[in-house]
Image: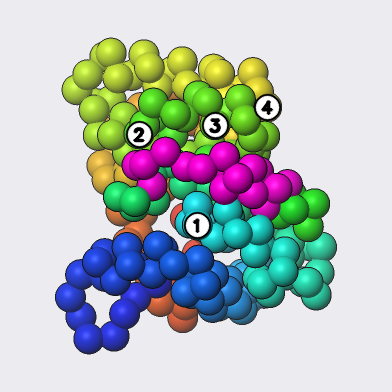
């Protein structure tokens, strides 16, 4: 997670940055450098995900600008590139075909470098299924909108089961986002989701606190 000094909400500044390919690539490169420092100290098989905005993917800068050239293969295999289903308001417009094609090439380049690929916020927009048709993914991150409802909505639970079944048939791992309560964790584990992510286990932490955490394992 990127944080800005001075407090206040970071969203307006982030939205401005991701509209500019050069600024977005510079920020992303800095985040990647920090992530690699952390990853070198994390014990395997823990991995880190890096969320790249569409504007960075669309410039083809993954291989040329991001600091992965001399990273050992054993570290690259523990890096996951997240392709975000919704990046910011600007992403709601139709993406030019040339930019979309560059995205695919960037994802392909990341995979060739040894990274795994995750589709973030799956189910948040109608284009999620189309993304599965267009790109090959290793991890499906199920949007928190489903997770919020599974404990009180059987229909949401059925949809979640269908997503898990589809992911398994594709050989894709699943991650449930936004888990805040034990009941949610119990349900997503029961329907077969592979991993959970959310405040039930921890909020975002600085590097030192993260490295001090034990392996949290299954939900309590």
**In the image: residue 103, left or right of residue 110:** left
**Callout 2 touching callout 3 (CB < 8 Å):** no
At numbered mark 3, what does the secondary structure look like: helix, strand or loop? Answer: helix
Number of numbered labels in the structure image: 4
Measured in 3D between alpha carbons, the distance from the residue under mark 3 to the one under mark 4, in whole angstroms, is: 16 Å
The span from disc 1 to disc 2 (Cα, nearest Å) is: 19 Å
**Which residue: 78% across, 57% down?**
113
The residue lying at 57 percent from left, 39 percent from top is: 97
The residue under label 2 is: 124
In the image, is residue 24 above or below residue 198? Answer: below
Decide which of tag 4 and tag 1 comes sooner along the chain: 1
Magenta-highlighted residues: 91-108
Secondary element at tag 2: loop
Mark seen at residue 131: 3
Please tell me which residue lies in front, 21 or 45. 21
Q: Measured along the vertical axis of the image, is residue 89 above or below residue 38?
A: above
Q: Distance between the residues labelled 2 and 3?
A: 12 Å
Residue at x-position 24% and y-position 28%: 149
* Residue where numbered disc 1 is placed: 55
Say which of marks 3 and 1 sits in front.
1
């Amino acid at each position: 997670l990127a944080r800005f000094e001075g407090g206040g909400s970071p969203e307006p500044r982030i939205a401005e940055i991701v509209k500019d390919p050069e600024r977005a690539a510079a920020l992303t490169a800095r985040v990647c450098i920090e992530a690699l420092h952390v990853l070198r100290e994390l014990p395997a098989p823990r991995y880190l995900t890096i969320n790249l905005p569409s504007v960075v993917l669309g410039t083809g800068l993954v291989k040329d600008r991001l600091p992965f050239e001399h990273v050992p293969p054993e570290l690259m295999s523990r890096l996951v590139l997240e392709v975000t289903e919704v990046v910011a308001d600007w992403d709601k417009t139709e993406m030019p075909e040339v930019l979309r094609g560059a995205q695919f090439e960037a994802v392909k380049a990341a995979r060739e470098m040894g990274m795994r690929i995750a589709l973030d916020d799956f189910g948040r927009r109608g284009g999620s299924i189309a993304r599965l048709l267009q790109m090959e993914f290793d991890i499906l991150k199920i949007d928190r909108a489903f997770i919020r409802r599974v404990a009180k909505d059987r229909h949401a639970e059925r949809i979640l089961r269908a997503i898990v079944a589809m992911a398994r048939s594709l050989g894709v791992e699943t991650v449930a986002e936004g888990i805040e309560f034990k009941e949610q964790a119990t349900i997503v584990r029961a329907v077969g989701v592979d991993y959970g992510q959310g405040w039930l286990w921890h909020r975002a932490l600085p590097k030192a606190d993260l490295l001090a955490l034990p392996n949290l394992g299954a939900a309590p």
